[in-house]
Image: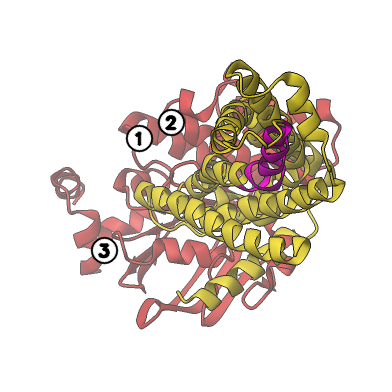
Chain colours: A yellow, B red
Amino acid sequence: MGLIASFGKYLLFIAEVFRKPERRSVMYKLVVKEVYELGFKSLSFVVFVSLFVGAVVTIQTATNMTGSWMPRYLIGYATRDAIILEFSPTIISLLLAGKIGSNIASSIGTMRVTEQIDALEVMGVNPATYLVRPKIFALVFFNPFLISLSMFGGIFGGLVAGTLAGECTTAEFITGIQYDFNSFKAVYAIIKTLLFAFVIASVSSFHGFYTQGGALEVGRSSTKAVVYSSVVIIVLNYILTQLLLN
Amino acid sequence: MIEIKNIVKSFTDKTVLNNVSFAFEKGKTNLVIGQSGSGKTVLLKCLLGLHEPEKGSIVFDGTNIVGKSTKNLKNLRKQIGMVFQGGALFDSMNVEENVLFPLQMFSDLANSDMLDRVNFCLKRVNLENVNHLYPSEISGGMKKRVAIARAIVLNPKYLFCDEPNSGLDPYTAILIDNLLQEITHEYQMTTVINTHDMNSVMEIGQKILFIKDGKNVWQGTKTDIITSDSKALQDFVFSSELFKTIKRIKS
């Protein structure tokens, strides 16, 4: 199928997702369940990755600051900007596209090939609304928390690694992360996070929802979900940066 | 009662159903039989409104569903129970939640009444003390019975079953067949069962439609099969040695 036809099909799918649900009370429960399944269960993964990447960013920055005339607090400053502007919103979203996106596509794809989606449809339940909307709401709601936590984790990792390696003192690092702080950078990061969360949930659901065949196709849908989500995130990242920061 | 008239359904250039007509009667187990690929499942999907036929009409107690939008079919779908070939139970829900699901979506009963209804339906299909087990923890026969319980929980007027005893041992298959027949009589439903299991045909075939290559080749009851002069039907039904012997003895 051509790119334009796929995009059209995706838009129709999104329109279907945002139709009126059969029962709002059921929808609320599902959103809470998905927040736990997709968001809460990713917490330790995000914190773990952020701590170590923050540490690496700090050490690499310190290694490149060879001039003795450069103030050491710049290590904290550079780490903060790298984490807030790019690592947490974009790289963590890409990692989540892998972790959550494949989970969403394979679970919905399996439901499709085992006729569970047909069962919903026969019962008179809109499967797109019932299955996909809670996932989109859950990710859009919870990902900003995850990404904020990743920012704190990354900067904290940098602080620990920087001081342990003797590259800067705790006070210098803290001065750095406070230096010339522009709160719009955090807003920019959250805007990106919200859009990326929507992309991860909707693109992965789309690929899972239209799976045809058996177990092999579920695997293929899962791979496609991760690849397409990642590509869309990368392209959107460039567009949003151009629009918001330039 | 469901009446289909001159149904035609094609996929790209292949005609899967060609002028199929039949009347599925209320309070009877109506069987659709035929070889794999004969068009049985496509016919069932047309009846469920999942496929739209190019020609013909499908009339549910006076209401033609052909050409109706999904929105307009919603009310009818609440009166339909469906048992899928593999059960199609929701993996993420336990047995109780699976049967409870249609009630939660469409009924205004209090929670305790819903649970009473779930337990009643599970008991009706001879399942007890399995409420908290997940589909992966129960046998194939139990899955089919849970699927039947889920299908009847809203007291449907129409029950559809796609190969309800495929993959089951002969004993469990007969239990499922008898259960479907009992439920059909008890609730006076219009039941349509897709099958190619000859034991089912001989057990519960109160009204039978035989399809071959998308065409309505024969219709009748289980007792008519023996005396039928349709060669296609005879070749299909009496293909196994066991049934050939039974036929010899009967005749």
Residue that numbered label 2 is attached to: B141
Left/right placement of residue B170 relative to residue A173 reads left
Q: Secondary structure at mark 1?
A: loop
- Residue B156: percent from left, percent from top: 67, 49
Image: magenta residue range: A73-90
What chain does mark 2 sit on? B
Residue at mark 3 shares a chain with residue at mark 1: yes
Residue placed at 49% from the left, 47% from the top? Answer: B84
Closer-to-camera residue (B31/A196): A196
> In this rendering, is residue B139 above or below A15?
above
Closer-to-camera residue (A12/A168): A168
- Report the amino acid beneath label 2: Gly
Q: Dot 2: within a 10 Å radius of its alpha carbon, few (fewer than 14), some, or many (20 or more) residues?
A: many
Give the mark count.
3
Closer-to-camera residue (A228/A108): A228
Q: Dot 3: within a 10 Å radius of its alpha carbon, few (fewer than 14), some, or many (20 or more) residues?
A: many
- Residue A111: percent from left, percent from top: 52, 46
Q: Dot 1: within a 10 Å radius of its alpha carbon, few (fewer than 14), some, or many (20 or more) residues?
A: some
Q: Are marks 2 and 1 in contact (CB under 8 Å)?
A: yes
Residue placed at 78% from the left, 21% from the top? Answer: A171
Residue that numbered label 3 is attached to: B233
What chain does mark 1 sit on? B
Residue that numbered label 1 is attached to: B168
Residue A123 in sight in this render: no
Q: Secondary structure at mark 3?
A: helix
- Report the amino acid beneath label 1: Leu
- Residue B178: percent from left, percent from top: 46, 37
